[in-house]
Image: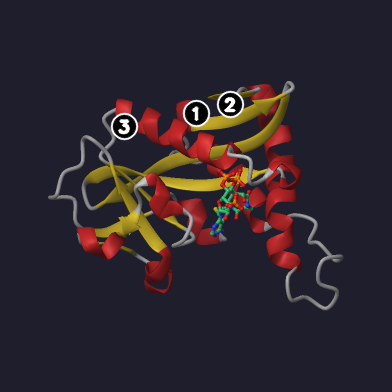
Amino acid sequence: MLLIRRERAVDADAVAAVHRSAFAPHYAAGGPAAGTALVEAPPEVALLARLRTDPGWIPTLSMVAIEREAVVGHVCVTRATVGPFPVLALGPLGVRPDLQSRGVGSALMHAVLGAADALDEPLVGLLGSLDYYPRFGFQPAERLGLAPDRPEWASHFQIRPLSAYDSQIVGEFHYAEPFYEL
Ligand SMILES: CC(C)(COP(=O)(O)OP(=O)(O)OC[C@H]1O[C@@H](n2cnc3c(N)ncnc32)[C@H](O)[C@@H]1OP(=O)(O)O)[C@@H](O)C(=O)NCCC(=O)NCCS
């Protein structure tokens, strides 16, 4: 049985461990001993730790996936801005490697997007795979007149408009500060 719920204070270490294991293979690929020399702590782990103390952190929108009472996945959205408009940025998203491709990531995505929609947030931006995220309603940001403030992120930057979407929200998307420290 899979449950999605808000993260609790006691979950923080387990959440970090999920991201450590989920992202480690990204950093092993192509290295001198690919597949064996996993980095100790992928940058996403430090990013999440920094986000937790940033003004952009939104505790109600940090969610965990629970199976057999263990944290097996996590996602959060944090406060971002487009000019004067408050918007949301998604990430990191991670699922324990041994439990991937079983719908946990999708469940987390639907839960956090549904919660953001219910809270009257206008849109969610993310940097990620052009193959994976369109199934959750994400589209290339440029179609909506949005662009990340780091031009090198533009090719993978996507937006999910929510019910409170407003077409006046155009221009540069600015993440919470920790994303720029990666
Ligand atoms: C991305 C991630 C969260 C998806 O979680 P998941 O529980 O495996 O997702 P689901 O089971 O809902 O969906 C799996 C499907 O998504 C697809 N998918 C997952 N990651 C993908 C990616 N980066 N690019 C393209 N497709 C992807 C797979 O093809 C898979 O399809 P399959 O079941 O036919 O193999 C998980 O793979 C993960 O933690 N990856 C490492 C961390 C990461 O890359 N996070 C996202 C970037 S912020």
Front in this rendered view, residue 171 or 130? 130
Say which residue appears at 64% left-offset and 37% top-offset.
Answer: 73
Residue 53 shows in the view: no
What residue does disc 3 label? 117
Picture coordinates of residue 121, whole percent (x, y):
29, 35
Q: How far apart are marks 2 and 3 (CA)?
A: 18 Å
Question: Mark 1 vs mark 3: which is more N-terminal?
Answer: 1
> Which type of secondary structure does the marked residue at label 2 adopt?
loop
Q: In this view, does 152 lie above or below 45?
A: below
Give the distance between the C-alpha atoms of the residues marked 2 and 1, in whole angstroms.
8 Å
Location of residue 152 with respect to 164 vertically, above or below = below
Q: What residue type is labelled 3?
A: Asp
Quick one: label 2 or label 1, which is nearer the N terminus? 2
Q: Name the residue under label 1.
A: 59
| Residue pictured at 31% horizontal, 32% vertical | 117
Please state, as top left, top right, bottom left or bottom right, where the C terminus lies in the image.
bottom right
Among numbered discs 2 and 3, the one appearing first in the sequence:
2
The image shows residue 90 at horizontal and vertical percentages of 45, 46
- Say which residue appears at 46% left-offset and 26% top-offset: 60
The N terminus, quarter of image: top right
Determine crowd level at label 1: few under 14, some 14-19, many 20+ residues with C-alpha closer than 10 A. Answer: some
Q: What residue type is labelled 2?
A: Glu
Query: Mark 2 and 1 residues: CB-CB less than 8 Å, in contact?
Result: yes
Q: What label sits on residue 7 in the rendered view?
A: 2
Residue 41 in the image: state x and y as whole percent: 75, 54
Q: Are discs 2 and 3 less than 8 Å apart at CB?
A: no
Describe the element under mark 3 as helix, strand or loop: helix
